[in-house]
Image (cartoon, rainbow, N blue to C red):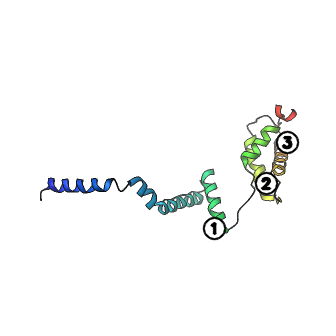
């Protein structure tokens, strides 16, 4: 059999299977565990290097909750604290850093009993006021605060 004949047979054989197998779906179905393991290793490496992104950290939290069998039903986020702070005060360049510090402190000290997310944000906003005062930063009330 010549190379041309072999090529024709091969092409005919592959085209016969083409309608039965969608290679994109095959890869997605055949390798999800491999993809998940690779993602776990990338997050572990980023954690070890100290270069976790917020998205990677959120994935790690989910992985750890499942492994520990412990699930947080409430959480406080920097974004939520920053939103509450921007409602209380006009935007300031230092507000992001203060919100990060305040959210971290509240998360470490808080022992809420279920319906306390708003109270946690209020505490964090109060902490921001203290941080700003300690740094000599004057935060001005926002327009929304007085309305």
Task: Using the numbered discs, state the Cα–Cα distance from disc 3 to disc 2 in whole angstroms.
Answer: 17 Å
Mark number displayed over residue 16: none
94 sits left or right of 19 in the view: right
Percent coordinates x, y for residue 3 in the rendering:
15, 55
Q: Of callouts 3 and 1, which one flags the residue occurring earlier in the amino acid sequence? A: 1
Q: Is residue 89 above or below residue 66?
A: above
On the image, numbered disc 3 is attached to which residue? 133
Q: Residue at x 85, y 46 (%)?
A: 126
Q: Residue at x 64, y 60 (%)?
A: 62
Q: Quadrant of the C terminus?
A: top right
Task: Using the numbered discs, state the Cα–Cα distance from disc 1 to disc 2 in whole angstroms.
Answer: 26 Å
On the image, numbered disc 2 is attached to which residue? 105
Q: Residue furthest left?
A: 1
Q: Secondary structure at mark 3?
A: helix
Q: Which numbered mark, 1 or 2, is in the foreground of this view?
A: 1
Instruction: Name the foreground residue: 83 vs 93.
Output: 83
Q: Secondary structure at mark 2?
A: helix
Label 3 close to label 1 by CB (< 8 Å): no
Q: Residue at x 17, y 57 (%)?
A: 6
């Amino acid at each position: 059999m010549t190379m041309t004949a072999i090529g024709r047979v091969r092409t005919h054989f592959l085209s016969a299977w083409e309608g039965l197998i969608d290679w994109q779906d095959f890869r997605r179905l055949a390798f999800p565990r491999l993809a998940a393991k690779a993602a776990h290793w990338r997050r572990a490496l980023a954690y070890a290097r100290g270069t976790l992104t917020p998205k990677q950290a959120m994935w790690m939290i989910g992985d750890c909750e499942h492994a520990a069998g412990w699930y947080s039903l409430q959480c406080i986020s920097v974004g939520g604290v920053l939103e509450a702070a921007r409602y209380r005060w006009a935007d300031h360049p230092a507000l992001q850093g203060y919100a990060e510090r305040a959210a971290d402190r509240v998360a470490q000290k808080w022992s809420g009993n279920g319906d306390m997310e708003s109270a946690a944000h209020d505490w964090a906003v109060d902490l921001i006021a203290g941080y700003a005062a300690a740094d000599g930063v004057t935060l001005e009330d926002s327009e929304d605060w007085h309305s």
